[in-house]
Image (spheres, rainbow, N blue to C red):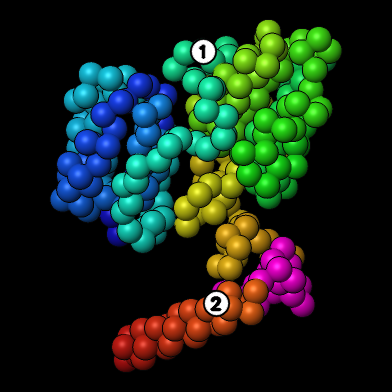
Amino acid sequence: MTEIVVAALYKFVSLPDFAEKKDMLLAYCLDQDIKGTLLFASEGINGTIAGSRLAIDAVLSFLRADPRLADLEHKESYTDTPPFDRLKVRLKKEIVPLGVPEVDPNQKVGTYVSPEEWNELITDPDVVVIDTRNDYEVQIGTFQGACNPQTASFREFPDYVRQHLDPQKHKKVAMFCTGGIRCEKASSFMLEQGFEEVYHLKGGILKYLEAVPAEASLWEGECFVFDQRVAVRHGLEPGSYDACMACGRPISDEDKASEHYQEGISCPHCFDSLTEEKRARQVARQRQVELAKQRHQASVEP
């Protein structure tokens, strides 16, 4: 099987004409048999796409042909199984929703810190280290000593900052997220709130796991990713988690041993919150999955 390239990319850049890009980019990606999601907003571009080596290179060149995206950076990983089922190109108000319109990373952001310099920064006792991801992401892996804001979505992050952090008390703050986009926008918000020394991990956890050897790493656990790989380890090797088909959360072997786990229907995180309508849809979907497996097995029997 041909190796599939997974490219994660984002850039905060002023794109007042972002809506005009959608149809042309969608058509080009379809021609290249690209799968994944790309988001456009007036503040920039964000997305993760997958395809052949030639296809990914072609789409990146297509994007960078716009002078405003000429220095668009991306991170790559590789898989043998398709991480996405289809392609989506969407227009949004924000490429990562914080819900604070006055925050503009195109105007100011915190200080970028490379993966090679990150360990030294977060082991400084004067630095408050904050994981800006959702709580379910933090639970399967994070950096040693990092604070978990216990947010259900990035939109809750501003309230966490207002309630738990003080610019006069917390002089140095370092933040991180999966690919760098959330902590970059969070740094812009915190500067608006009066924090003076704000740092964020350039390239995010994924770049750190790629660049920093496991024996030197301060990362503990696995990193959740928003595709069918579910999680990755050091070196961006596939992780050990599956995803619940009902709520999307990562589930471990221990979760699957729970009495509240039903394959394709529910897991310990969502079994008591599923509506009857949602449960019925999941049951029907799982039945279709099992029938498809049976048909496939029958077709390959000698």
Depth check: give the residue in front, 45 or 156: 156
Instruction: Residue at 65%, 25% (x, y): give it.
Output: 175
**Residue 278 sits in quarter:** bottom right
Q: At 40% from the left edge and 27% from the top edge, which residue is drawn?
A: 43
Indicate which label's residue lies in the foreground, 1 or 2: 1
Helix, strand or loop under label 1: loop
Q: Quadrant of the N terminus?
A: bottom left
Query: Which residue appears at 47% of the width and 53% of the height?
Result: 227
How dense is the environment of label 1, judged by Cα within 10 Å: few (below 14), some, or many (20 and up)?
some
Can residue 43 be seen here? The reply is yes
The reply, left or right, for residue 42 in relation to residue 182 is left
Task: Say left or right for 189 vs 288.
Answer: right
Residue 267 percent coordinates (x, y): 68, 69
Q: Which residue is mark 2?
A: 282
Assign a secondary structure to mark 2: helix
What amino acid type is highlighted by mark number 1? Lys
Q: Nearer the viewer, residue 251 or 107?
A: 107
Residue 113, visible in the rendered structure? no
Q: Which mark is residue 13?
A: none
Q: Is residue 297 magenta?
A: no
Q: State the extent of the magenta-drawn residues as a range.
A: 258-274
Q: Is residue 34 above or below residue 62?
A: below
Q: Is residue 271 magenta?
A: yes
Which of the marked residues, 1 or 2, is nearer the chain's N terminus?
1
- Within the image, what quadrant is residue 163 found in? top right
Residue at 72% in and 63% down: 269
| Residue 127 picture location, percent across and down | 76, 16
The residue tagged 1 is 108
Instruction: Check disc 2 and give the amino acid type.
Output: Gln
